[in-house]
Structure formats: structure tokens, C-alpha cells
């Protein structure tokens, strides 16, 4: 299974192939990191990773708000820690959006590890994508990597175990 291992440089996250390419000063293919400059357009992230019923988390306050909302509504949260430069993240994004539309009894979130670096580090993210399954704010399951069948399997198991299905 292909997924991007991360290296925390203290400034931003890089996948292992990218950090190697930086050290060797060569250009990598699918997993090249885009350098951020003032005025970078956020629309790339929004278009790639949101849509359907996927909520983009851009602040800790929004994270807290969504977790509180999920708790009030009795929803399990699926938190997708991703990066705009991550090929596997881009590959699984359409399925994630589709699942968010199919399973409205769950709350689907996406967190950009580069935008919320400290927050992502606090969740001990070692690879992207990493999916956390949370009930009442507590982790009940985790999936590392863009494994489509396993993501679907875990979501179906959560929905099937819930007393009220949608």
C-alpha cells in the first residue's frame, strides 16, 4: 500500500521521498512538495479534498466546534489528516467525498497537516492520509494510508454497530 511517510522539519511536513529529494537537490515526481508563498490560493485544497459532506478544518476552534456538534448529534467523526501535495491523499479524496454523501449519520472532516502543523503533530501523524475515527471525542479506530477497501470496511462497521442508521 502506497502512502507518504512524513518528516517534520519543524516548519512543515514532507514525505520521505520529498525530504530525500531536498537533501539530494533533485526533483521528485508525484509527491513533490509545493513551496508556499504569500498569496497562495487555498482553492487547490478546497477543490481536491472537500465537497459532499466533508468539512475543512482550518482552525482549532472549528475542530472543537465540529466535535461538539458531532457529540450533540450522536455522530461518529472521521478525521482525515491529509496534505495537498500527497498523491495518495488526492487518490482517496473522491471516495471520501462519496462516503460522506452516502453515510450522513457520520461527520467527515479533513485537516491539512501543513495548515495545522502543531495540531497534526499533537495527533502523532506519521503518514498521510491518516484517518481517525472518533466517538465523543475519543479515538475508536485508526487507518493509516489510502486503503480504499479498508476505509469502506471500517465505515460500514461503524454504521452497522450504531443503534440508529441513516
Image: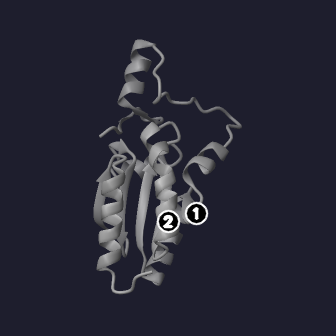
**Of residues 68 and 89, which is closer to you in this image?**
89
**Residue 48 at what x, y percent from top left?**
57, 47
Residue 94 in view (yes/no): yes
Which residue in the rendered view is the most extreme toward the bottom? Answer: 163
**Residue 24, label in figure:** none
List the residue tagged with mark 2: 100
Percent position of residue 11, x then y: 47, 35
> According to the image, what is the colour scheme of the structure?
one colour
Few, some or many C-alpha atoms within 10 Å of disc 2 (few <14, some 14-19, many ≥20)? many
Q: Is residue 124 above or below residue 75?
A: above
Which residue is nearer to you in this view: 161 or 10? Answer: 161
| Image quarter in which the N terminus is found | top left
57 w.r.t. 72: above or below = above
Left-right relation of 17 to 104: left
**Can you name the residue that lies furthest to the right here?**
39
Callouts 1 and 2 close, C-beta under 8 Å: yes
What is the spatial separation of the Cα atoms under label 1 and label 2, in whole angstroms? 6 Å
At mark 2, the secondary structure is helix
Q: Which residue is mark 1?
A: 52
Amino acid at each position: 500500500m502506497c502512502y507518504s511517510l512524513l518528516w517534520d522539519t519543524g516548519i512543515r511536513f514532507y514525505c520521505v521521498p520529498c525530504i530525500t529529494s531536498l537533501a539530494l537537490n533533485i526533483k521528485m515526481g508525484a509527491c513533490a512538495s509545493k513551496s508556499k508563498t504569500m498569496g497562495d490560493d487555498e482553492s487547490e485544497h478546497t477543490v481536491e479534498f472537500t465537497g459532499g459532506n466533508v468539512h475543512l478544518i482550518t482552525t482549532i476552534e472549528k475542530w472543537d466546534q465540529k466535535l461538539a456538534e458531532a457529540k450533540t448529534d450522536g455522530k461518529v467523526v472521521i478525521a482525515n489528516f491529509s496534505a495537498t501535495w500527497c498523491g495518495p491523499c488526492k487518490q482517496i479524496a473522491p471516495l471520501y467525498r462519496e462516503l460522506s454523501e452516502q453515510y450522513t449519520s457520520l461527520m467527515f472532516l479533513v485537516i491539512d497537516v501543513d495548515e495545522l502543523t502543531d495540531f497534526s503533530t499533537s495527533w502523532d501523524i506519521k503518514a498521510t492520509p491518516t484517518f481517525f475515527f472518533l466517538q465523543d471525542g475519543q479515538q475508536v479506530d485508526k487507518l493509516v494510508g489510502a486503503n480504499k477497501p479498508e476505509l469502506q470496511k471500517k465505515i460500514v462497521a461503524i454504521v452497522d454497530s450504531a443503534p440508529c442508521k441513516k
